[in-house]
Image (cartoon, rainbow, N blue to C red):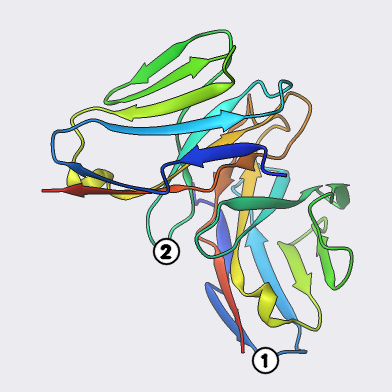
Amino acid sequence: QQQVKQSPQSLIVQKGGISIINCAYENTAFDYFPWYQQFPGKGPALLIAIRPDVSEKKEGRFTISFNKSAKQFSLHIMDSQPGDSATYFCAASRSGAQKLVFGQGTRLTINP
Amino acid sequence: NAGVMQNPRHLVRRRGQEARLRCSPMKGHSHVYWYRQLPEEGLKFMVYLQKENIIDESGMPKERFSAEFPKEGPSILRIQQVVRGDSAAYFCASSLVRDPGTGEQYFGPGTRLTVT
């Protein structure tokens, strides 16, 4: 059972454009939604996270939009740069549980 | 403050051999998590440990896999009698507190296991 579904699987964006990655979840008990960035050969690193009491969170060029009724959340990367080329994972967890449930990942390529 | 350390970074084992993967959490972190990443897939939770205790092993295969986090030393993920399907990247994460919503999980660089 795939509890967190992520799309697209891969994405190519021109430098300066907006990259958008979407995730949908099934478990309404989830209350923490982080995004991780992973470069080849490295471990995932937390990029930005949101709780369902807000609909949007922005940190620099990175924004999470959250739609609780639709059980969806998305990552927007503004002014995308070649250095943003990486694999991005959405994840979810619920209070009291320790494990993160990850989406399948999106391989993002920013063309110069 | 050194990050999460994992060794070896790459491990090659023949079918039937044992694999031992080590994880040293960040200084001061007493919560350790192991995740497995198959090629072109997301990370899948395997086990959560605190010092000397396995708290949640709901993601661990029932056979051949075991994990420990002793009072002294690194956490160990042990895979006995490896098979080709065990080939994957194994990531360890650690946190200062239990709840990922309040305590970030910091990931190590991973161990890439190849079974030939």
Q: Which residue is mark 1?
A: B14
Q: Which secondary structure lies at badge 1?
A: loop
Residue B78 in picture, x, y percent from top left? 77, 71
Q: Is residue B67 above or below residue A38?
A: below
Residue at coordinates 78% horizontally, 59% vertically from top-left? B72
Q: Are marks 2 and 1 in contact (CB under 8 Å)?
A: no
Residue B96 percent coordinates (x, y): 65, 36
Q: Amino acid at mark 2?
A: Gly
Mark 2 secondary-structure assignment: loop
* Left or right side of A10 for A55: right
Label 2 in the same subunit as label 1? no
| Camera-side residue of A31 and A2 | A2
User: Which amino acid does the dot numbered 1 rest on?
Assistant: Arg
Give me the residue at 75% from left, 81% from top.
Answer: B82
- The residue carrying pointer 2 sits among few (fewer than 14), some (14 to 19) or many (20 or more) residues within 10 Å by Cα, namely few
The reply, left or right, for residue B12 in relation to residue B2 is right
**Count of labels in the image:** 2
Q: Which chain letter matches label 2? A: A
**Residue A41 circle label:** 2
Find residue B7 and report its horizontal and vertical position in percent: 58, 70
Image height of A49 relative to A3, above or below: above
- The answer for how far apart the CA atoms under marks 2 and 1 are is 23 Å
Residue at the outermost left position? A112
